[in-house]
Image (cartoon, helix red, strand yellow):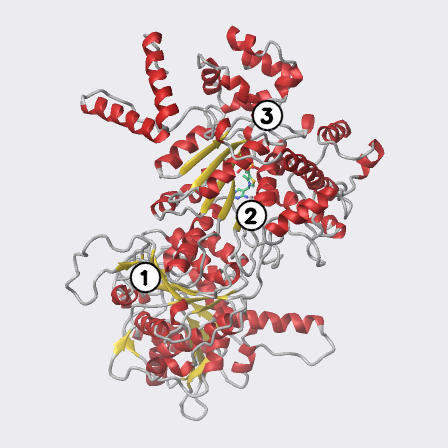
């Protein structure tokens, strides 16, 4: 801090400023100050940059929008009941054992932040208003349930079933649309994902408006974050985008209770100041809500700035410590440091000092902040609210390091909680932890109903189905892809881009298609779409693009249809989620296609994909240039051999590894039918390749098999009685399988049925379902898996080969009759020619042939010497290192 060398001169400058503020206003004052600073810099004076403002509330007392005393009083009564119920939900769930868990302290610190929002700001969707979107801190869920109970939306039975969901009717631990599809709108509890998803939801609302699809102008996205949560890179990673895109429909509320799970967030610093600097630097409107109204008169009397100095020199570790003790302690440790401050509070009792509240617990301050936030235009707002973790829990956890996981409260602490919030409970009742409601005709209930009616209805609430059902194109719309490419070699990526172009031109759904790319359009041959469909940019295009004279120039436009998200897979994924949930959040079904480098898909943003599944997202994910040996020159970090395994564990993700353009067309047409026409809550993942080859036409009747996961592509045509094998393959490796079948026939007289297997994952799911049904219905006729159906009556061992790790094809082992062998690309990728890589990973035609012969030999159909012959004929070195370890 700088020293004041001439207080009289300082006073003169201050007085000059005061008079400008009084007579000419804040804008003029700002102009003059800016001029002075600029001039100082011009003259060479080093004026240090400060991203922070004093440790005070941003909105001074005179400029606060205010609630009436009556509103404040009733709000307080309602909030007190909600506080109690929230606590009771967790205490009751853990009365027998701590197995179920749950959190008390976080909601108690945030109760006022939520309550003021629910009572006065958060709007539900109606015919006239699209509704606000709420991202609620996951572990504050008991407080949200508690409110819904008071509102009469949840029953006592449901509260008693907090975290007991398996029997039906329970309440999910955290906000999960998958588990409570009419209640929770946004999944949040994986720290950091809520904030980044909120930013992209807000941007997508702008996109819908700019493209004329919906009026979203008056809708807000409210995202509640923990201060500890801001350490997640995802929390802050996209905030610059929010201001660049002028997301004035976005409000972050960061509950700065100064604690995370283990202890202080910034014991040695001040999280509020740190976040202020970061958000201001990123161009946000920052509103600090640090001090409650009780402090206003003290701050007003702080003519020397000593109180502010004391406020600024204390670190968060001390602030936390003060509030874990009592008023006498605060007097001694905070005010007691300077005689002038001791004197300032000399007339106050210890209780009065203790009652000096923090801003985030003062509805007056919180209301003023929210009111300013919703009126802000041109930039997003963050509210930094200072609170106390475990507020009201007293010796059972208030401001204590252990408070995050506290699930029990001592009787005395409970009694003090009751007294503090004036709850109508006797000592005997306290022990029973009853859930409390107001009488139906009470003033509180009437007021509560009025408030929510004025705001459009109750929240949280989620729309399960869109009221709009769109007509999707028939498969025949993709005629070009179904006919094959005789004499022409193309990749499945090219086939996909053509399908996408067809869809973008479709009269019924074309305008609902949202192509999303990280910085990768040219990689996938999509740059032609720039000019035709435009890249979404609210600012339009303020420059003439370098390539303006070309046919396919880089065109940005406010109604651009493509989302080019930059090198930012997490953001692009969040963008996709926003589009993929628009059917629910905006009642506008959109059809997003997000295409990315497959290695930077599931592996990179798996947690967001999990959240997408939870969100019941509907749309297409496309892993471009996929396969461990197909994206050949890029090496270890790029070559994906496992995204299909990751995709297989997401319950509502339907995934395919197609080889031919007609397979891509059949799969996309089916995805459109399921997700858009029938509104099924699934999403599709397809891998696409960059290897060029000729594509055959759709074999007659193959559609159902493609979708179920396998179909007979080429029937064996060997001599009668020839040894026979069943060969399966997917993606580009299916072509090696076909070549392997040719080798087997030509070199060893072995016949092979060749199956295209676009989805080992769907085959496994079908097989597991049959197996489970059989186990639970022992006396009924046995059901057969689709794999068994296909292979029944087809002789010989089964060999599969893919461009993914062996466990991908291995998924169907249990359902394959007879001997099964799965070839795959286990191990780290590397760069080389495709044929070298396929040999290295032992998935090329020669290995397919050797694997088939080895299985036949094991079955005793052919002698072992034949296998040895093939190994030598095909030049395979048996001493070659195992690629899965090389
Ligand atoms: C990605 C992720 N990592 C860890 C957790 C476990 N976790 C839940 S709450 C919490 C502490 C949260 O602290 P803060 O964000 O400050 O919220 P508060 O409870 O203090 O309001 C942690 C570590 C999680 N939910 N998600
Ligand atoms: Mg915290």
Marks 3 and 1 sit apart, C-alpha to C-alpha, by 49 Å
The residue identified by callout 1 is 560
Q: Is residue 747 left or right of residue 219?
A: left
Question: Is residue 864 at least partly visible in the picture?
Answer: no
The residue that label 2 is drawn on is: 122
Residue placed furthest toward the front? 23
Q: Quadrant of residue 865?
A: bottom left
Marks 1 and 2, how far apart at CA:
30 Å
Q: Specify few, some or many for label 2: CA neighbours under 10 Å numbering under 14, 14-19, or 20 or more.
A: many
Given residues 74 and 384, the one toward you in this image is 74
Numbered badge on residue 758 = none
- Say which residue label 3 marks: 357
**Front position in the image: 679 or 612:** 679
Residue at figure coordinates x 77%, y 48% from the top left: 440
| Mark closer to the chain start, 1 or 2 | 2
Q: Mark 2 or mark 3, which has the lower sequence index?
A: 2
Q: Secondary structure at mark 1?
A: loop
Question: Residue at left 41%, top 41%?
Answer: 236
Is 290 rendered above or below residue 96?
above
Return the x and y of residue 2 as percentages of the image width and height. 34, 14
């Amino acid at each position: 801090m700088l020293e004041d060398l001439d207080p009289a001169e300082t006073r003169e400058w201050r007085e000059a400023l005061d008079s400008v503020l009084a007579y000419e206003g804040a804008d003029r004052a700002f102009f003059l100050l800016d001029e002075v600073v600029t001039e100082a810099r011009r003259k060479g004076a080093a004026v240090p940059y400060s991203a922070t403002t004093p440790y005070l509330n941003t909105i001074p007392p005179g400029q606060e929008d205010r609630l009436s005393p009556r509103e404040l009083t009733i709000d307080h009564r309602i909030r007190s009941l909600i506080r109690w119920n929230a606590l009771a939900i967790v205490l009751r769930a853990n009365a027998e054992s701590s197995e179920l868990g749950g959190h008390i302290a976080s909601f108690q610190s945030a109760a006022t932040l939520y309550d003021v929002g629910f009572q006065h700001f958060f709007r539900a969707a109606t015919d006239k208003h699209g509704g606000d979107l709420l991202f609620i801190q996951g572990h504050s869920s008991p407080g949200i349930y508690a409110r819904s109970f008071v509102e009469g939306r949840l029953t006592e039975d449901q509260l008693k079933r907090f975290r007991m969901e398996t029997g039906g009717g329970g309440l999910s631990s955290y906000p999960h649309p998958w588990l409570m599809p009419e209640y929770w709108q946004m999944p949040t509890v994986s720290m950091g994902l809520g904030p980044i998803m909120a930013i992209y939801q807000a941007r997508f609302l702008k996109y819908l408006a700019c493209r004329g699809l919906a009026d979203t102008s008056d809708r807000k996205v409210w995202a509640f974050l923990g201060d500890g949560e801001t350490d997640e890179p995802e929390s802050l990673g996209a905030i610059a985008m929010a201001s660049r895109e002028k997301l004035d429909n976005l409000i972050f509320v960061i509950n700065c209770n100064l604690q995370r799970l283990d202890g202080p967030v910034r014991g040695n610093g001040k999280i509020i100041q740190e976040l202020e600097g970061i958000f201001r630097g990123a161009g946000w409107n920052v509103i600090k809500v640090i001090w409650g109204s009780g402090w206003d008169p003290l701050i007003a009397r702080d003519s020397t700035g000593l109180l502010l100095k004391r406020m600024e020199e204390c670190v968060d570790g001390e602030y936390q410590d003060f509030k874990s003790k009592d008023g006498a302690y605060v007097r001694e440790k905070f005010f007691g440091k300077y005689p002038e401050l001791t004197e300032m509070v000399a007339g106050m009792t210890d209780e009065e000092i203790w009652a000096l509240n923090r801003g985030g617990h003062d509805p007056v301050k919180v209301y003023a902040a929210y009111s300013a936030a919703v009126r802000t235009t041109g930039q997003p707002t963050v509210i930094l609210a200072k609170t106390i973790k475990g507020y009201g829990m007293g010796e059972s956890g208030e401001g204590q390091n252990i408070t995050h996981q506290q699930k029990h409260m001592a009787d005395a602490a409970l009694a003090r909680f009751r007294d503090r919030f004036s709850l109508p409970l006797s000592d005997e009742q306290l022990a029973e932890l009853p859930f409390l409601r107001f009488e139906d005709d009470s003033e509180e209930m009437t007021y509560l109903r009025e408030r929510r009616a004025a705001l459009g209805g109750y929240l949280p609430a989620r729309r399960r189905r869109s009221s709009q059902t769109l007509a999707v194109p028939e498969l025949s719309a993709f005629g070009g892809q179904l006919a094959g490419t005789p004499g022409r070699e193309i990749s499945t990526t090219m086939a996909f881009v053509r399908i996408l172009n067809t869809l973008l031109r479709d009269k019924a759904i074309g305008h609902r298609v949202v192509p999303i790319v990280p910085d990768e359009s040219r990689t996938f041959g999509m740059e032609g779409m720039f000019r035709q469909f435009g890249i979404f940019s609210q600012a339009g295009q303020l420059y003439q693009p370098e390539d303006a004279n070309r046919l396919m120039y880089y065109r940005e436009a406010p109604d651009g249809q493509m989302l080019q998200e930059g090198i930012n897979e997490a953001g692009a994924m969040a963008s996709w989620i926003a589009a993929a949930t628009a059917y629910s959040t905006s009642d506008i079904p959109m059809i997003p296609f997000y295409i990315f480098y497959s290695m930077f898909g599931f592996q990179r943003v798996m947690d967001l994909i999990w959240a997408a599944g939870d969100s019941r997202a509907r749309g297409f994910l496309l892993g471009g240039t996929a396969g461990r040996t197909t994206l050949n020159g890029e090496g270890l970090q790029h070559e994906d051999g496992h995204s299909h395994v990751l995709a297989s564990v997401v319950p509502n993700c339907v995934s395919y590894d197609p080889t031919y353009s007609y397979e891509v067309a059949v799969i996309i047409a089916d995805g459109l039918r399921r997700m858009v026409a029938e509104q099924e809550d699934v999403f599709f993942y397809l891998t696409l390749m960059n290897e060029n080859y000729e594509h055959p036409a759709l074999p007659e009747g193959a559609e159902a098999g493609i979708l179920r996961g396998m179909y007979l592509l080429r029937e064996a045509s060997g001599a009668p009685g020839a040894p026979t094998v069943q060969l399966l393959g997917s993606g580009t490796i299916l072509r090696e399988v076909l070549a392997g079948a040719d080798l087997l026939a030509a070199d060893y007289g072995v016949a092979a049925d060749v199956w295209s297997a676009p989805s080992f994952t769907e085959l496994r799911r079908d097989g597991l379902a049959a197996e489970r049904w059989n186990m639970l219905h022992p006396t009924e006729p046995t059901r057969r898996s689709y794999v068994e159906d296909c292979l029944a009556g087809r002789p010989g061992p089964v060999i599969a080969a893919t461009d993914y790790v062996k466990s991908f094809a291995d998924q169907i082992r249990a359902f394959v009759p007879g001997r099964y062998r799965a070839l795959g690309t286990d191990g780290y990728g590397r760069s080389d020619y495709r044929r070298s890589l396929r040999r290295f990973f032992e998935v090329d035609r020669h290995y397919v042939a050797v694997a088939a012969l080895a299985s036949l030999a094991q079955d005793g159909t052919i002698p072992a010497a034949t296998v040895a012959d093939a190994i030598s004929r095909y030049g395979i070195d048996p001493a070659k290192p195992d690629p899965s370890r090389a």
